[in-house]
Structure formats: C-alpha cells, structure tokens
Image: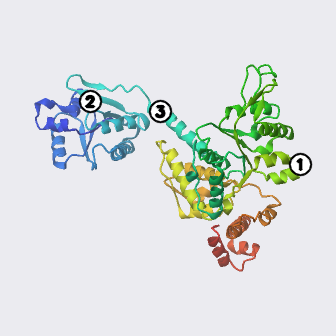
Amino acid sequence: MKILVSWLGQTDLNAAAGDERAGLGPVGQAVTERSFDLVVLLSNYPKSASANYVTWIEGHSVAAVELNLVELSSPTHFGEIYQAVTNKVSALHAKHGDSARLTFHLSPGTPAMSAVWIIVAKTRYGAELIESSKQQGVRTANVPFDISAEFVPEVYRRADQDLARLSAGLPEEAPGFSDIIHRSPVMRRVIEKAQKVAPRSVPILIEGESGTGKEMLARAIHRAGPRRDNAFVAVNCGAISHELAESELFGHKKGAFTGATTDRAGYFEAADGGTLFLDEIGELSLELQVKLLRVLQECQVVRVGTTTPVPVNVRIIAATNRTLTDEVAAGRFRDDLFFRIAVALIKLPPLRIRKGDFTLLVDHLLERINKESAADPAWEEKSLSPSARNQLQGHAWPGNIRELTNTLTRAAVWSAGSSITGQDIAEALLELPTTTDTGDDILNRPIEDGVDLPSLIQEVASHYLRRSLDVTAGNKSSAAKLVGLSSYQTLTNWLQKYGAD
C-alpha cells in the first residue's frame, strides 16, 4: 500500500479556496502526478478549513483521504511536531505492517515540519521524501546523507566521551573550589586549608582514598594560585615504567638509550612556571625518590644522557592513596622526601564520613550525567526514585565519588524510562569481596579530624542486614535470628532505618 503522509500548508488551503496563484498546491500536485492508495493529512488549522480541504482534494484524487487534526502550541515547536508525526506513522505501521510504502511530503507546512520529516525518514522509518513546486512539479527530494549511519554514531561518540570522562573521575580542565560539592564540616575544613595555602608556592601533599577527588582539589589549588595562567601537568607516578621513569620526569638526550631518537623534555620542564601534579607519588621507587629529592632541592633537572643542568621553577602538588607516614616507617618512602613535599598536608576524607554531602553529590552527578547525555537522541532525562536513593544511602562506597559516579552512570544507561529504580541501582552496584580486616578498618579509623559515628553504624548495620537476607533467600524471620533481632517486624524496622530495604 502506497501512503502519502503530509502536513497541510497555507498554500494547500489557498488552492482549495480557488487562489490561482497557489495552483493545485503541494499536496494537490503530489496526488495528481503520482499514484497513492491513501493520503494521510496532518493539520493544525481549524476543523472547518481542514474539512473543506479534504472535500476539495477528494475531487482530485482516487486515493482515500484521512484527516488528522493536531493541536500545536506553535507550528515551529519541534517536540510537538515530532510527537504528532511519530504517533501517526507508528499507527500506520501497526495497521498496515510491512505492506505500507510511505512517502513524506516536505513542501507543505513550516521548515520545522520539513526538518522532522527528514529526521523521521532517516532514523526511524525508511520513507521516500518528496518535494513539489509549480515550476518543477513533484520530485524525490535528494537528501544526500543517512542520519542514522553518519551522524547518530558521532552524537553517541561525543556523549560517550563525556560519560567516560565523568565516570573516570576526571575533573573539568579548570575547576575552582566552588565546583567541589560539599556542605559537611569535614570537607569545609579541607577547603579552608586548601584556600589558605593556594596563594603560596609551597609544596602540598594530598592524602586520600582512591576516588576521593585528589586531582580535582589539586587543580582547584592551582587555579587559585599565582601560577594559574601557566601549565598544570598531571603525572600518574604509578603508570610510569621503572625503566623510563627518570626519562619521563627529567627528559633525555637523543641517543641516551635505545629508542631515544630525539631530544625530549620531561614533565618538570613541561610544567616550568606552573604546577606539577605527582599523583600516586608513593609508587615511586626508592632510587627515583633520591633523584626527585635532588631536583626539588636544587630546582634544576639533568636530562638522561647529559650532565648539563636545566633550571626549572615548578610548584609540586603530590597525592597518594597511602598514608606516607606509614610508608616512611616501613622503609618504603624516604623521610627526607616526605618532609620536602608535605610542607602543607591535606587529607581528603572518604565519602562515608562526609555527613551531609551525599545527597548533594548524587543530585549533582545525576544532573551532569543528564547534561552529558543530552545529545543522545534516545536519551530520557533520568531521576531517582525513593527506593533508588535508599539503595544508594545504604552502600559503603569504598571507591568513593568515582564509584558513586560509575554506579549512577550504569544505572542511568541501563534503566528503562525516566525513573531509576532501586533494582536498577542494585544491579549497577559492584560489590567488592570483603577482607578479613574490615572490622579492624572500621574500629581503627583516624579520629583526629573527627569520625561520623552514625554513618559507621549505618555502614555496619546495612552490610549485615543485607547479608542476612541473601543467606536466607529473603526470609525475614530467619534473617532476624541470624543478626540477633527479636522478630521479622524488628528486622523490617531496621531495614527501613538503615536504608537496606
């Protein structure tokens, strides 16, 4: 069945009213020059004018004519136009199946209507596109591209790059302290310390668990300091091979070793005048620690293969997920280098003790995920259901903000519809195997900067409550006995209290 689908345009109405300048109008031209079994008209004009046109066009075509009145707040409202078009075309496919041979008419209506026909034809339905004019008649429109093949993958690629950057925990290029989402007292103290030390050029050591945002804080310090207009060079010390570490940091001369085909400046020279961020500095070998200490003391580097010193002026911000005082005590980190880089020591707290920050971070990250995914043509803006929020609240987040970001990203991508459910979050969580010293970690956490006792209690309670339900296959009476509670009702109350339901 050959079906013409078209909006009614003003020229069509003028033709039906006898205006000679309009001729037959775009739709009239199409049905007289080509053969169709059904003509489907969409109209946002008044019912009387639209019905008069149907009577007129039936006199010029043997095809059946179907009129669909559509209410639009504006004839250029893309969203409403798209919805009306896809609803109608989907209904035609449902009714006529594979026998439907669709043709969309581009000429009648507004440019927005024409644009939607092209999008729908190139992405969802394999329809022919036609256009018409008094001078050239009716012809197939030459649209020399395939949106779904050529442009949609590029849209996905850009959206995926943004999501990948977000889920990897990579900060914006120039974050400030205001970009660090917080309201907890413990994070407020951290930001205050960072703001005080930022205008100085003294070395800074940032300690914190993986995923707590050490690089983001380092970039914010750089942006707030006197070197903000110069380079910020980030180096992951744990990713540098032992054999090439000296060359990577200090540079080398051509021919210094196999593969050194040109002279090369190292990271210190690249950061000259700016800030060098040495991430995971605790991974450096003791041999390289000695050489690094000398560079920091003398403010000059010697490239591998030369004896000529090159002056460098860099600010060092180092970071580690270890406690360097423990590493010094164990003989794995030099005490003289530690005191050199830890002129200002900032300890980033883990997410589990940042009381009051969690909801802010969840809302902020979900907003970013929606923003980064907005270019995806199939994306629905996501929101969190109450059960999803409870599921998030009950998790311990050993991977901190990076783990939270990854979990939200997975749940958002996998969720059906606009609401992320508790089940979506449960499936997106990646549970790490517990170690035998989990209890010791909870009991022996540093208390100097304060601990969030309610959060610790919630972490322990929700952990064992969920395990008891897993072991008993959801039998609350049996689970209550496993965790020493008097009844299944008491267990239910605890599940609700600690967000483990």
In front here: 448 or 313?
A: 313
Residue 333 visible in the displayed image? no
Q: Which residue is mark 2?
A: 35
Q: Could you tell me which secondary element the residue under label 1 belongs to? A: loop
Quadrant of the rendered image containing residue 346: bottom right
Q: CA distance from mark 1 to mark 3?
A: 56 Å
Residue 493 visible in the displayed image? yes
Quadrant of the rendered image containing residue 479: bottom right
Mark 3 residue crowding within 10 angstroms, few (<14) / some (14–19) / many (20+) = few
Q: Which residue is mark 1?
A: 331
Q: Could you tell me which secondary element the residue under label 2 belongs to? A: loop
Answer left or right for 125 relative to 237.
left
Q: Which residue is mark 3?
A: 151
For residue 464, above or below residue 21: below
Q: Along the polypeptide, which appears first: circle 2 or circle 1? A: 2
Q: What is the number of callouts on the image? A: 3
Quadrant of the rendered image containing residue 78: top left
Q: Along the polypeptide, which appears first: circle 1 or circle 3? A: 3
Q: Could you tell me which secondary element the residue under label 3 belongs to? A: helix
Answer left or right for 443 relative to 13.
right
The location of residue 68, given as percent across then percent down, is 26, 46
Q: Along the polypeptide, which appears first: circle 3 or circle 2? A: 2
Q: CA distance from mark 2 to mark 1?
A: 88 Å
